[in-house]
Image: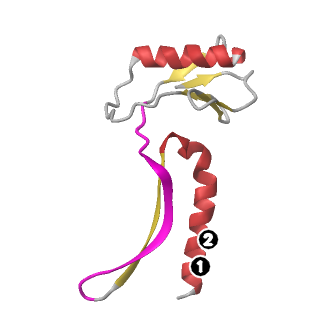
Amino acid sequence: MRVRAPRVKHFFDDGEYYCLLNRDFVVLGGTHDEGEWDTTVNDDTSNRILEENKRRIPEIMGAEIISHHVGLRPFRSSLRIEKETIRDNNGKETTIIHNYGHGGSGVTLFWGSALYVTELLENLRSHL
């Protein structure tokens, strides 16, 4: 969920719940529902996320709730960030850059992943 909480000045993530700063709001979360594909907002889950984050970060008390969101974050036991070259039946090669499996950590890992993908692309371009 997104809340307006200007008193919050730090990120928080204890592996169960998290608070991520943004320019105009704070993102609160904390679910790990393996095999769950429903993207409907669940009021009980929203209330639990809010209350547990308040308990961990008192500055969230009184925060204005801006919006609720449900996202699916596919997870792998390890990230897949690599270059793969495939060949079609005519012998034409195509290079694919894989970049997935971040799970709920994508919002914190994407900068490093994007930089690494950029490096892979630059190396590929230098060999053309």
Q: Secondary structure at mark 2?
A: helix
Is residue 7 located in the magenta-colored stretch of the structure? no
Q: CA distance from mark 1 to mark 2?
A: 6 Å
Residue 10's x, y, as percent? 74, 30
Residue 94's x, y, as percent? 38, 79
In the displayed structure, 9 sits above or below 54; it is below
In the displayed structure image, the side of residue 75 where residue 123 appears, left or right: right
Q: Which amino acid does the dot numbered 2 rest on?
A: Glu
Q: Residue at x 50, y 15 (%)?
A: 48
In the displayed structure image, the side of residue 77 where residue 34 appears, left or right: left
Disc 2 target residue: 119
- For the record, the magenta segment spans 70-90
Residue 12's x, y, as percent? 67, 30
Q: Which amino acid does the dot numbered 1 rest on?
A: Asn
Q: Are marks 1 and 2 in contact (CB under 8 Å)?
A: yes
Disc 1 target residue: 123
